[in-house]
Each structure stands twice: as structure tokens, then as C-alpha cells.
Image (tube, rainbow, N blue to C red):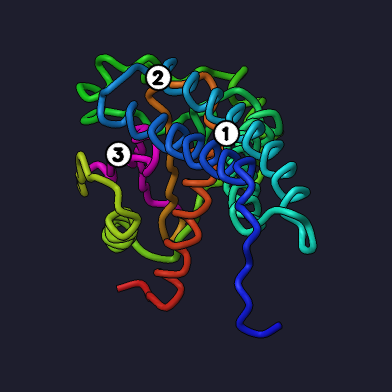
Amino acid sequence: MAGSRDDRRVTPIATVGLALAVLAALAGLSAGLGYRFGWWPLGAGFGLLRYAAYGALAAMAVSVLGLVLARPGGERRGLYRALAGLVIGAVVFGVPWSYLRAAQAVPPIHDITTDTGNPPAFVAILPLRADAANPPEYGGEEVAAQQRAAYPAVQPLNMPLPPERSFEEALATAVDQGWEIAAAVPAEGRIEATDTTLWWGFKDDVVIRIVPENAGSRLDIRSKSRVGLGDVGTNAARIEAYLEKLEERISGASPS
């Protein structure tokens, strides 16, 4: 009957499921932010993220029970609370699960470059990596072989512009990417920068080298994490995104 009041009580199971999901979400979010702001070490952050995933699974299980109890025509209300708990729990669990799947799909390396035989070297960045867990030196053929197998698209960029113009375009593209520029040395064709990830605040360092080649220029780039055995494909993705943006930028440019 229109306007009638629903006297059914809200099932506490739905409320508990939603509360667990929200707590798991807060724990998962704070796992990365706490490391970024120095509240706890990386291991503690990963541990908190793992427990957030477990909490999300529990929230999903409880919310499913809440859906059953609060189903249309049932004796209890709380359907939307149960749905919210299920959705939030799925998202919270899905984030670390997707990271795990990505990590399993790529080799455990964290130093990617377009020139594995002679990778661009860090210079200005070296003092910033003094306390980094990963040394600035390249890992050699063992790392190169894994990169070639996993990221065949990471290749040098040949540009139809003279080195001076190429340097300007490369630097502007790096700035557009939001990287913190540590050095820009036109005489050496070298650009160094740091990219900080949003959630965990991981700092990955980038060095770009531009040299004359034929009638234009060749650009090589290297991206290396300061911490972590693997990078879940982040460095390769960063390089590919940068080169794509740079190609778009110079597509309308002409040699001067």
C-alpha cells in the first residue's frame, strides 16, 4: 500500500559487513600513505595492506550473508548496506590482488632502459640515491635479458630534429609528466628527474640521453626504482608513456 511504513528492522549483519569494508578500506589506504609520510617502514605498510585484503574478504563474506537476510520480501532490511559492503570489500581486495597478478606477470627487475648495452648513467641523481636500497649501477646482461623478454617495445627513439631541438622537446615533455627535474645539461644532452608515485610515494629516478644520429637525434631513457626487487612493470610503463607523449609533441615539429 502506497505510503505504508516498513516496520522491518535492519539486519545487523549488513551493518557489520559495511563497517568491516570501510575499516578495510581505511587500512588499505593508510598502508601506502603511512609509508609515504614516514609513519612506518615499507614492510609494515605491505603487512597492513595484506591485512586490509583479509579484512575485505571477511567484509564480503559478511555482506553476502547480509544480502541473503535483507533480500526483497525477507524479514529484515539493510539490502543497500549489504550491497555497499560487498562492493567496497571487492574494491579493497581487488587492488592488492591486481598488484599481485601484475607482479607475477613480469620479471622481478626494477631498472629499465632503451639501451641495455650502454644505459644512460645517473650523475646529478647520485646524491639523492645515497641511502636507496637499490644501487645506481645497471645490473648487466642478466637484467637486460629479462627486460628484452618482457618489454620488447622499450626501444630508443629516433627524432628528425637536431639535438638542441630534441633536448628542448624532451625536457618539456618531462616537465609535462610532472617529474621533478634534477638536472638539464644541454651540452651533454642529459636530463635527470625523479617521479614520485601517488599512493605509496615511491621515488623512481629517470635519466635521458640525447645524441646526434644521422640527420637527427637519438634519445635513450632509463627509469630505475630506489626500493623494491620488482616494480610491477611501473618503470617500463613510465618509459613507454613518456616516449609516446614525446612522439606526439614532435610530430608537428620540423628541423630548424
The alpha-carbon separation of the residues under discs 1 and 2 comes to 16 Å
Query: Which residue bears the numbered disc 3?
Result: 194
Residue beneath the point at 60% across and 26% down: 144
Image vertical order of residue 174 relative to residue 63, above or below: below
The answer to whether the residues at label 1 and label 3 have Cβ atoms under 8 Å apart is no
- Report the amino acid beneath label 3: Thr
Q: Which residues are magenta?
A: 188-213
The residue mark sitting in front, 1 or 2, is 2
Mark number displayed over residue 232: 1
From what the image shows, is residue 236 above or below residue 76? above
Q: Residue at x 42, y 78 (%)?
A: 252
SS at mark 2 in the image: helix
Label 3 to label 2: alpha-carbon separation: 19 Å
Q: Secondary structure at mark 1?
A: loop
Quadrant holding the N terminus: bottom right
Let me know if residue 204 appears in the view.
no
Residue 118: give x, y in percent of width and height. Answer: 47, 29
Q: Nearer the viewer, mark 1 or mark 3?
A: 1
Q: Which mark is residue 42?
A: 2
Q: Amino acid at mark 2?
A: Leu
Residue depicted at 21% across the width and 30% down the height: 124
What's under tag 1, amino acid-wise? Val
